[in-house]
Amino acid sequence: MQYFIPLFVAVPLGGAFLIAIIGNFLKGFGKIFTSIVLAFLTGFSLYIVFTLQGSLVYGIGGWELFDKIPIAIYMVLDGLSIYLLLIINLIGFLSAFYSISYIQKFTAENNYYTLFCLMVAGMNGVVLSGDLFNIYVFLEMAAIASYALVAFGIEKEELEASFKYQVLGGVSSLFILLSIGFLYWYTSTLNIADISKVIAKKGGSQLVVFSQVILLSGFGLKAAMIPFHAWLPDAHSSAPSPISSMLSGVLIKAIGAYVILRLFFNMFEVSYNTSLVITIIGTLSMVIGVLLAIGQWDIKRLLAYHSISQMGYVILGVGIGMLVLAQNGERAVAALSIAGGLFHLFNHAVFKGLLFLNAGAVEYETGIRDMKRLGGLSSVMPVTTSTSLSASMSISGIPPFNGFFSKLIIIIAAIQAKYYVLSILAVFVSIITLASFLKVQRFTFFNKKGENWIKREPPVREVPFTMCFSMVFLAVLCLALSMLIVPSVRDIVLTPAVDALIEAGEYTTSILGY
Amino acid sequence: MIVYILAVFLFLIGIYGVVVKRNLIKIVIGIAIMEYSVNLFLILIGYVKDGTAPIITDQVSEIVFVDPLPQAMVLTAIVIGLATTALLLAIAIRIYKKYGTFDIREIKNLKG
């Protein structure tokens, strides 16, 4: 079984290569092939979710351990990796399918699908890699593809946003590389499991703390946590809408939040100071992100600010779990809190992906993103309106949608861990989110008909089939994911992911064998 | 020790360029300087005094090798850096065509 792990990287990478070559001769090859590749990977990751026991380890090149020293470059697939892989490929498939109609108005479709496949390959690689430098390489692959995709419209705004994103992204990548250098200096190895053993044996030092700080700021920049968030609203609102939904829904999680979780649980020992910093960053993102979102009138910019806020929930949930673990509190509380964070991560990918697709549908038909000039679209775009309504209820935490349950779990865990202030803040932010999305619904879809689109030629109507399909699928998922709180479903999908973080030693054991 | 400090100092010069300079091309140069300083730092980590190239021969026991792993890492990092710099410059040229300037004070369509 473990011999199939590299497929997650090889298939999209090969796909990108084939699209760049064959697409020139065969019109329409790119769009069909991308959807097929990602549908295949989604099905494959679903299959692994149901069959995975423990974790799978694949050493590239087949090198065995030599004297308990890992020589091969490892790919590790455990509960957390497969959870992320499922999210990446599912949202990727739906975005690619949505793009079939959406991207027709752009030229150079082939380049779009090539970059799309490269981005997915990079993210899959980051999630699977068990080696620090490999994480850096795959991360750059995903990041460079996303820089180019943000600039895909090549108008003034897109270019400016892309340049800003590239400068900050480039600086954060170099921070990450520098801290990898420091860690290699201290431990003489790059394998994550081996580093954790060496640090445990040699004891921590100032150098390790320093590299932790640089790592946290580097990946914090990639995840757009609050002091480092400046690029996110520009980049995510300027990209083509399916790419916005990939960036907001998946990219900031796969190359930002996931790596923070993986490194700070499985590589470094969970300590009180780092968990405190992570919790504070999460809380700040949650509160400030939503406050910045209130005044926005550009629909995609508003959604981008909400991404910061919702990622704050994810980091907050995990941070509370780390704090409890670091203080040797009850493991059940820590597990509940981390489960809440990871559950919200999946939910956010689904509803934020859907909201960006809705915004794309509105822009596709009317060409307008300013909410003040829209209004009354519910009469002509029923599918977009109803799916957007369910996503809005999901993000603002209204039962029985999935966002309600994940927020509820995080709040209950915060109360059980006696962080009452954080739980009150989480409720407060949820209320402001609701207000903000009532505004979106009212000014875009209800209200009286806007004059800016009513005379438009051709007349505004419902979007084509592929776009509708993706939106309806995600809207159904918004409801269906609530099933993850049912214990028998939770044990298959969510619990292995939480165990991978809490039982940090098992990750090391699965690679090194001791 | 002094060479490591110089490498970090070079990194700080790069950050200074990115933060303070207002010309797009100078910002790109700042990022390139940061990148070279990180590469230099990685190479210095692998350096062993009086070491030779790590090729296994018959007299393995008598020879001191330099660490080859950072060299492999730096080769990869240089290729990645090439891609980033090329893309940055391409975007900068496109921006110049649209805005007619390299000054970031005049390129501010996005805010709020």
Image (cartoon, rainbow, N blue to C red):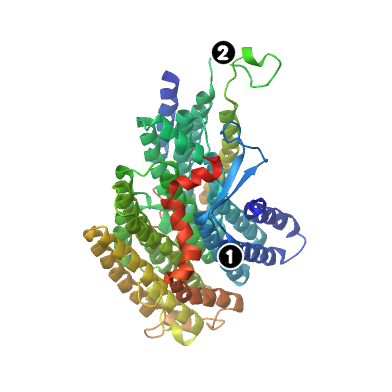
- Whole-percent x, y for residue A71 in the image: 60, 35
Query: Quick check: marks 1 and 2 in contact, CB under 8 Å?
Result: no
Query: Mark 1: few, some, or many residues within 10 Å (few <14, many ≥20)?
Result: some
Helix, strand or loop at mark 2: loop
Front-most of A342 and A393?
A: A342
- Whole-percent x, y for residue A296 in the image: 34, 66
Query: Mark 2: few, some, or many residues within 10 Å (few <14, many ≥20)?
Result: few
Q: Of tags 1 and 2, which is closer to the observer?
A: 1
> In terms of image quadrants, where is residue A38?
bottom right
Q: Is residue A103 left or right of residue B101?
A: right
The residue pinned by badge 2 equals B50
Against A128, residue A434 (above or below) is below
Q: Is residue A104 left or right of residue B36?
A: right
- Whole-percent x, y for residue A391 in the image: 43, 74
- Whole-percent x, y for residue B90 in the image: 57, 47
Query: Which residue does the image show at 31% across and 54% down from the upper left?
Result: A330
Q: Is residue A151 left or right of residue A417?
A: right
The residue pinned by badge 1 equals A46
- Whether residue A313 appears in this view of the structure is no
